Image (tube, rainbow, N blue to C red):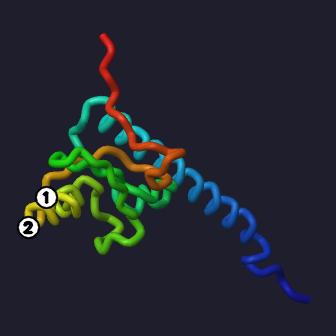
Amino acid sequence: MGTKSREAIYGASIRAAAERAAEARKDADRLAVEAWNARMLGFQGPAQPSPALGDALNAGYRYLEVKCLGCNTHQTVALDIVRRPKTTPVHELERYMRCRQCSEVRRYPYKRSHLVALRPTKISASDPPSTWWTGER
């Protein structure tokens, strides 16, 4: 005569609670990213405080849109290849962004870029760059 194991007794409820916790974290990360995007697009900053890289990736936002202040081009940077800890806030990446076109023209690394928003997809013809809100009054 054997007894039921703890896995058989509590396993299903523990797995269900873990799944609910993972969904809650994903929803919280998505809301934090959407709030940061609204602040960046509505007020054109400030970039701080920003969600962490891991939070943005967990929410499904895989790209960071950056605008060069020299040539006014928009580019996307894949967050999953950034060599920083996943706890790094997104706003700390701004100082490392360089425009390739401006750097080739000037023949030195040109660092004047501005963070625009986090995006789930790259910039393409069907998904154009983000635009600043006009601030209707």
Residue under numbered circle 1: 111
Q: Residues within 10 Å of mark 2 (few under 14, many from 20)?
A: few
**In the rendered structure, which amino acid carries the disc numbered 1?**
Lys
Residue drawn at point x = 16 percent, y = 65 percent: 104
Task: Tell me where residue 76 appears, x and y as whole percent.
Answer: 37, 56
Residue drawn at point x = 35 percent, y = 67 percent: 86
Left or right of 84 in this view: 122:
right
On screen, 128 above or below 132? Answer: below
Q: Quadrant of the C terminus?
A: top left
Q: Which mark is residue 24?
A: none
Q: Nearer the viewer, mark 2 or mark 1?
A: 2
Q: Residue furthest bottom?
A: 1
Q: Residue furthest front?
A: 105
Mark 1 secondary-structure assignment: loop
On screen, 121 above or below 35? Answer: below
Residue drawn at point x = 17 percent, y = 46 percent: 69
Left or right of 62 in this view: 108:
left
Mark 2 secondary-structure assignment: loop
Residue under numbered circle 2: 108
Depth order, front residue of 104/123: 104
Depth order, front residue of 87/24: 87
Depth order, front residue of 2/72: 72
Contact, mark 2 vs mark 1 (Cβ under 8 Å): no
Q: Residue furthest top?
A: 137
Task: Tell me where residue 65 appears, x and y as whole percent.
Answer: 35, 51
Q: Quadrant of the N terminus?
A: bottom right
**In the rendered structure, which amino acid carries the disc numbered 2?**
Tyr
* Disc 2 from disc 1: Cα separation: 9 Å
Quadrant location of residue 56? bottom left
